Amino acid sequence: MTTYETALGASTPDTITLLGHDLARDVMGTVGFGELAFWLATQRRPSPGETRLFEAVLAALADHGFTPTAIVSRLTFLSAPDSVQGALAAGLLGGGSRFLGVTEDCGRFLNAVVRANPEPDDWDALALDTVKAQGKARIPGLGHHVHKNGDPRTPRLFEIAEEEGLAGPHLSLFAAIGRVHPRVLGKTLPLNGAGTCGAVLADLGLPLELLRGFALLARTAGLIGQLAEELRNPVANDIFLSVDTNTRSVAPVEE
Amino acid sequence: MTTYETALGASTPDTITLLGHDLARDVMGTVGFGELAFWLATQRRPSPGETRLFEAVLAALADHGFTPTAIVSRLTFLSAPDSVQGALAAGLLGGGSRFLGVTEDCGRFLNAVVRANPEPDDWDALALDTVKAQGKARIPGLGHHVHKNGDPRTPRLFEIAEEEGLAGPHLSLFAAIGRVHPRVLGKTLPLNGAGTCGAVLADLGLPLELLRGFALLARTAGLIGQLAEELRNPVANDIFLSVDTNTRSVAPVEE
Amino acid sequence: MTTYETALGASTPDTITLLGHDLARDVMGTVGFGELAFWLATQRRPSPGETRLFEAVLAALADHGFTPTAIVSRLTFLSAPDSVQGALAAGLLGGGSRFLGVTEDCGRFLNAVVRANPEPDDWDALALDTVKAQGKARIPGLGHHVHKNGDPRTPRLFEIAEEEGLAGPHLSLFAAIGRVHPRVLGKTLPLNGAGTCGAVLADLGLPLELLRGFALLARTAGLIGQLAEELRNPVANDIFLSVDTNTRSVAPVEE
Amino acid sequence: MTTYETALGASTPDTITLLGHDLARDVMGTVGFGELAFWLATQRRPSPGETRLFEAVLAALADHGFTPTAIVSRLTFLSAPDSVQGALAAGLLGGGSRFLGVTEDCGRFLNAVVRANPEPDDWDALALDTVKAQGKARIPGLGHHVHKNGDPRTPRLFEIAEEEGLAGPHLSLFAAIGRVHPRVLGKTLPLNGAGTCGAVLADLGLPLELLRGFALLARTAGLIGQLAEELRNPVANDIFLSVDTNTRSVAPVEE
């Protein structure tokens, strides 16, 4: 008979444990939610500094106003108000390669270089090689369509990582890319916040395959905020009507 | 021209604000993730006590081992490993009336009574009327299929609420239901943890229409933990095979 | 050891069966897709007339232009173009109580009356009682916000059902409600197409708990059409920008 | 003001059109569901032969018994029976790279070769080059873990395509790959049915970016069948219990 092992939640008639600890006595009332999310993902309890840095990333990614994911969540709630889970799930499904993917792409990109070059003498030289090797391909995390002169989240994430003694090789490489890329690209692009979040999450040792998942966790809190605001001050129907009233029926492609 | 208002995330080329505050300076590094989730949902910054109680609820609901939602998330990740967002969304879609719904159902049930009876003289008398009025209908939050002698999360939630001075009418009524229901039902059932979470969230003033959303937020962290564990120690394919190898083909109903 | 029974798909190294038939030889090339969907849902092969009526329902529900579900699917595809399954799933999640739910609500509503009154002498008398019993509650399927003088799909569905000899008690009752409700409500409302679809599906003997599912099946085809059109003639980014550029940041509710 | 164009559904108070045709008069009762799905995706009405071949593909992909997607849909329905849309959406979310992706991967793979070699003199020579160029990479559509001696759907799809005069370059190349690959790989693998479906859909001129979408459309019908069977003969709770009762709690990775 197959046995399924887990170190996460478990219960008997008299006890509930989570990650090997008594849930009620040792986790509830003691462990913050960001700390718990980190612990669940790594099965390692983070230090207070790690928790602070991780929660700074979650704050950076939680909500960016009327993004497609927020619009999708509100429209789905309009159509199916009986299913909050559907509205949240629909919003998260937009968390793919384009809108929420930068965090993961940047973390993985940096990690591939870092693993191949574990103890570089000169970050700038490594960064220069890295940027050149990309050729015409985009460097994940470089550039922002709005914050062209700098994304305010980026220096703050570096600052918190430094304060907590947690700036590791991913942030070092990313910073170096920020310094050297103009020599190759001929123009200066900002390091964006979503990419910096990926570098931070990689430095924190979180699983690379799931970096997008942390962006989605942050966004779940943001989407609940969006739905709460939709309940107080609804706009989804107006968004729908703004499309509906500006629709023009055209002939099919072929006929 | 329609205008869409939001108090959540906003940005200009040089600034990013969240809930009216400078995101980088005033939120990142300062505001914990549970605190932020509360703030986003209510647009009111919680006190440290409110945050602690809210995070205790999130811990209570984050992961319960191989629940249907966890199995669903792992199986979806097995089928579509390229789409973490799909695996999380699929898991959340099980957060409906049966498995994650108790929290919301209990919060709403208690709230309906509390609103109709704003300042009762005697909670036990009100609880007795409430239990009687249900007739044969289930009282949300009462009973647990595993923790028949008491759910360990329940007293802990009451305790933290008391410590923080945040036990309000929903918890008072729920506690009273716990005391009086044996007189009506002829048997003693435990107040379950998921229901108590609903009472706590209602006492914290969180939007009743979204109580299920907080269970889903907690579960998102749990599902990331499940996927991380699946990456390290995969079981989804074994679960699939345990079904596949025990399948029996039968004749259609009619033919 | 538990055994899991199914009459649907099954395979051995040399054979594949579906619903007890050899898939390649007896189903592929012979059974149309609407016919197959009916067969899968009921495990009973429909007659050609049943298939024609069922496919008329699916056509009636497949696409209604830029509905919230279509907008959601397009926006999700914009955000996560690597995940077609996510874009379709997000669109379907809007298929809840408000936008796609009328079909199921109407079918269930009629069925409750039909089951309680299996062989009425007089459909109009039964309909009159039914309308009166609703009091101020809405009658599912009655009224349409655009087609105020009549939904063109409604008479066509009645016509096809008559042609195929498949008009049963649900359609009879719904037609009678259409005749008598003005006497109670004091105004004449059209029987809408989505509601009529529910009556037809109930008359066809499809499972009531899944009537919404057939609307979702029809809509899946429609959403693929929406995504195909989005690929040729994209509008999702314009929809996003029309929201983004008309956003106004306001102060949080409390602070 | 932005205008949003569509050739799909449109309505005025008195009319409803779909693809430029009067929905009630010209589509309902006349156009089958497979035909309509093809038409919606291409905006071109398929011939009867195209419809027959397309519907054969949909039948081939509709249901394969207790796959992960079927299990996911049933478990989600168990957890959230109030949300049929959630159960279907969750099932579809498993339609990613591994389980339902072969159809799309194979169609795209063949198409890349076909576009680069529009009128080859010798399909076998082209196939040989194609197989060699893959090196150690898998050729999509080649091999099947159960049907090792041949997938029964494959010859049937070739047969129907021949009968309808619709075997095009994608099927020609795929057949040639089936003939020549043993010379390169040193072993004979079957052309699987899901891959052949991709070749057929590409030959039919359906949009390559959405080939996975047609597998998902077929699967939606299959999942409704699964949920209907679950209602009659439930197994989801047994599947859950078979996991739950064989769970073993282990220590976290680090601690």
Image (cartoon, coloured by chain):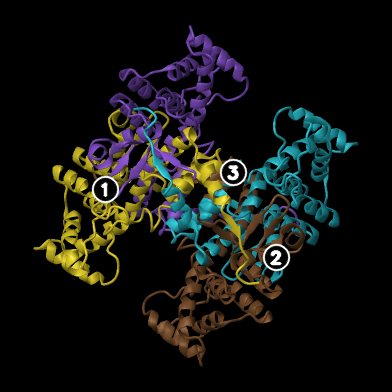
Chain colours: A cyan, B brown, C yellow, D purple
**Is C110 left or right of A241, judged from the image as shown?**
left
Q: Is residue A58 visible?
A: yes
Q: Identify whether A160 is placed above or below B113.
A: above
**Is B186 left or right of D137, judged from the image as shown?**
left
Residue D161 in picture, x, y percent from top left: 35, 21
Front: mark 3 or 1: 1
Residue at 20%, 37% in the rendered image:
C48
Amino acid tagged 2 = Gly
Q: Residues within 10 Å of mark 3 (few under 14, many from 20)?
A: many
Residue annotated with mark 1: D14
Residue D202 in picture, x, y percent from top left: 44, 25
Distance in Å between CA atoms under marks 3 and 1: 41 Å
Residue annotated with mark 3: A96
The foreground one among D229 and B223 is B223
Q: Earlier in the sequence, mark 3 or mark 2?
A: 2
Residue annotated with mark 2: A32
Front: mark 3 or 2: 3
Read off the chain for label 2. Answer: A
Residue at 50%, 21% in the rendered image:
D110
| Res D228 label | none
Secondary structure at numbered mark 3: loop
Distance in Å between CA atoms under marks 1 and 2: 58 Å
Amino acid tagged 3 = Gly
Residue A65 in picture, x, y percent from top left: 61, 55
The foreground one among A79 and D125 is A79
Residue C137 in picture, x, y percent from top left: 30, 69
Read off the chain for label 3. Answer: A
In the picture, residue B9 is in which quadrant?
bottom right
Amino acid tagged 1 = Asp
Q: Residue furthest left?
A: C121
Front: mark 1 or 2: 1
Q: Residues within 10 Å of mark 1 (few under 14, many from 20)?
A: few
